[in-house]
Image (spheres, rainbow, N blue to C red):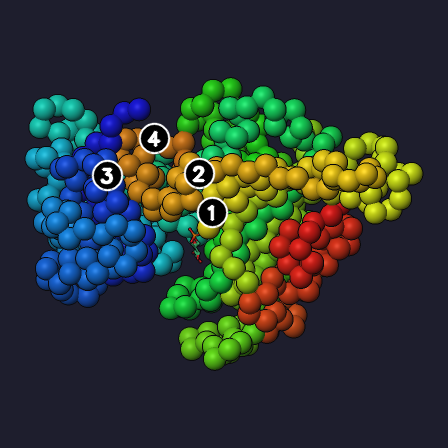
Amino acid sequence: MPVPDPCVVVILGASGDLTSRKLLPALYEQHAAGTLPAATRVLGVSRRPKPDEAWRDELREAVRGHVRDFDDARWATLAPRISYLAGDAARPEEWTRIAARIEELAPGAACGNVLFFLAVAPELYEPIIAGIGATSLVPRDRRVTCGDDRRAWRRIVVEKPFGVDAPSARRLNQRLASVFDEADIYRIDHYLGKESVQGLLALRFANGIFEPLWSERFVDHVQITAAESLGVEDRVAFYDQTGAVRDMIQSHLLQVLAFVAMEPPSVFAADRIRAERRNILESIEPPDAADLPRAAALGQYGPGGDRPGYAETPGVAPGSTTETFAAMRIRFDNWRWAGTPFYLRTGKRLAAKRTEVLVQFKPPPTNLFRRLGREVAGRMVGADRLLIEIAPASEVRLRFLGRAPGSTFSLRELEMDADFGGRGGGAEPEAYGPLLLDAMRGDQSLFKDREEVEAAWSAVEPLIGPASEVLRRGIRDNYPPGGWGPAASEAILARDGRRWSSGPSSSPSV
Ligand code: BG6
């Protein structure tokens, strides 16, 4: 694997939550692991004036709170490479100054390479891209050389949500293309940086035993859950404009779904993997307006304990119908999955922080044990399943039936489990770290291409467009905190004779 090139990481939106909770902890972890090129520099740009030293102190405390093994001495070797510039990157006239500062830092060890990271509110993406485009940092012929004639690069990492719907994503893609080559655009989704999400590819394609079963012939249905116990916390301004469908389903859950459902690529290479992810997302058949109330549910958490419900949270617009929970049934119009539904759900203030994929296999074609009575025969329904837990633990568990000990013939459930993450239950490194290194080495496998993003928007359009009004009626306080979301979410599966794997009734059935 190529080593990452040193560069200046320019974080636009340096005072935001993403920078302190994810980006700097990720860079620190990679630095501590010795994988961050020593000549890397970090420049944070944000509006509020503050000296370099003050920003470094803030970051040190933030990083300390977000990584497992913080070490002051290690931090001391990273801190001098971090600097700060007060500036409004959304104002094109400020870019002369910002570009000058980048140019001071970029030559020399970083060899002129610059990695921009858009960690700002999505409405600022376009003016910032225009600002970068107006500087000499990205020349028209895109040729920048480093002292010794090697080509230097300028790349941009764009956070989600990438647009607010398919047309705005298309427009943003055009804006980016007017400044950067596609090969230099990195549409990030940190779920693709999670080792356990990538583990899905190994599980499916490094083994011969799962793939023959991986289709509508043997799989009854698939459930993908990303539950969170926290509420919207201090991100109200962003969240109230965004909601769970745009924040989680359009990006993270559809990416996990793509890894579960895609065809095997012909070889493990960036362009082939991206092409397969795109193909599978393009074969989603979104529910039509008539089917929507049966295929999807939206919710908003109510008050509980001493905490206000979403609607009463300071900053939430009066009468807001923004969803903090979303569930949907996905059908594919393709050869492998036609007839096998995939159920997706995500929500804030649920019973637990839990991300998992459940693959429920069909029962055997005939029930050989039917004469042994309901108790025995009934166990065969919904017994075989593969549970892939992504967070908090990273485990895979295969459940199946065996003979129960005793003088009469009976069946019992057995389970085989494995440490899927290979870290003995320990936490994975922050997912942004490996992704930032990939961007520095020019590997786009775990980033989305333009068609993939647009296909993901089309798949969720009914849940965010005008048709979703029907799902938003009576949304306020429609689920209590600490549970598994609104009753309408249970009803999607109940109508199909199924149940969610965790929820009021825990064991899934076909
Ligand atoms: C972010 C969302 O992308 O992912 C947040 O904006 C969410 O709302 C977070 O909390 C969940 O990420 P993780 O890695 O904690 O599952």
Amino acid type of disc 2?
Answer: Gly
Residue 393 is labelled as 1
Mark 4 lies on residue:
443
> Cβ(mark 2) to ligand 1 < 8 Å?
no
Question: Percent position (x, y) of residue 75?
Answer: 16, 50
Between 162 and 23, the one nearer to me in the picture: 23
Query: Residue 136 sits in which quadrant?
Result: top left
Mark 3 lies on residue:
33
Q: Is residue 410 left or right of residue 182?
A: right
Classify 10 Å Cα crowding around label 2: few (below 14), some (14-19), many (20 and above): many
> Disc 1, disc 3: CB below 8 Å?
no
Find numbered disc 4 in the image and state the secondary structure of the residue it sits on. loop
Residue 340 in sight: no
Question: Percent position (x, y) of residue 447?
Answer: 40, 37
Q: CA distance from mark 4 to mark 1?
A: 28 Å
Query: Which is in the foreground here, disc 2 or disc 4?
Result: 2
Mark 2 lies on residue:
421
